[in-house]
Image (cartoon, rainbow, N blue to C red):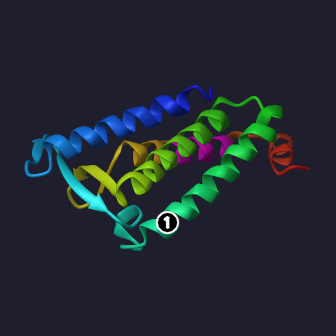
Amino acid sequence: MSFLIPLIILLDQITKILGEKYLVNNSIDIWFFKLTYTENTGMAFGLFQNNSFLLGIISSIIVSVLFFVREFYTKKIRSMYLDVGMIFIISGAMGNIFDRLRIGYVVDIFYIPYFSIFNVADSFVTVGGILLAIYFLRSNKYERRIYRFK
């Protein structure tokens, strides 16, 4: 399933480049949300603004740990929820790390009024987190023990 990582990153980067090209001075209303262009130097919900470099370092460490855990410890566990969830989180985080390295901020393009503005990478991180939650809620005690490295 690791082949999904570069595909998800590519999808994320293409949408951000298109957002930069077509949405900088032009927002598009689509039903209940809006396509718009925003430069986010912080993290989710605009927290920790103007700390892009520090957030990039922290994100890189987290991605490295997740990738290591996925490659060396979860091979014993046969769970699509666990595998895909981790791949989605790693891919989404890497997409945002590439933005921080490439331009010094993260491009957000999807705006839902009264909620938040986000991008494709953020969506994959969120769905990955939901899949991991489902895995941990549905797994039995034996699987959780293996995952905890016992």
Residue 17: name its quadrant.
top left
* Residue 109 in sight from this viewpoint: yes
Q: Which of 123 and 133 is in front in this view?
A: 123
Q: In this view, does 47 lie above or below 110?
A: below
Q: Is mark 1 on a helix, strand or loop?
A: helix
**Could you say where residue 33 lies in the image, as x and y percent from the top left?**
19, 46
**Secondary structure mainly formed by the magenta segment:** helix
Q: Is residue 24 left or right of residue 2?
A: left
Q: Which of 102 and 69 is in front in this view?
A: 102
> Which amino acid, by three-letter code, is at mark 1?
Leu
Q: Is residue 104 left or right of residue 53?
A: left
Quarter occupied by the N terminus: top right
**Could you say where residue 64 lies in the image, as x and y percent from the top left?**
66, 51
Residue segment shown in magenta: 128-137
User: Does 57 appear in magenta?
Assistant: no
**Could you say where residue 145 lies in the image, as x and y percent from the top left?**
86, 47
Q: Is residue 55 left or right of residue 66?
A: left
Residue occupying the point 16% across, 47% down: 34
Q: In this view, does 145 lie to the left or right of 96?
A: right
Residue occupying the point 45% across, 49% down: 98
Residue occupying the point 67% across, 49% down: 66
**Could you say where residue 97 lies in the image, as x and y percent from the top left?**
47, 52
- Label 1 Cα neighbours within 10 Å, binned few <14 / some 14-19 / many ≥20: many
Q: Mark 1 points at which residue?
A: 55
* Residue 115 in sight from this viewpoint: no
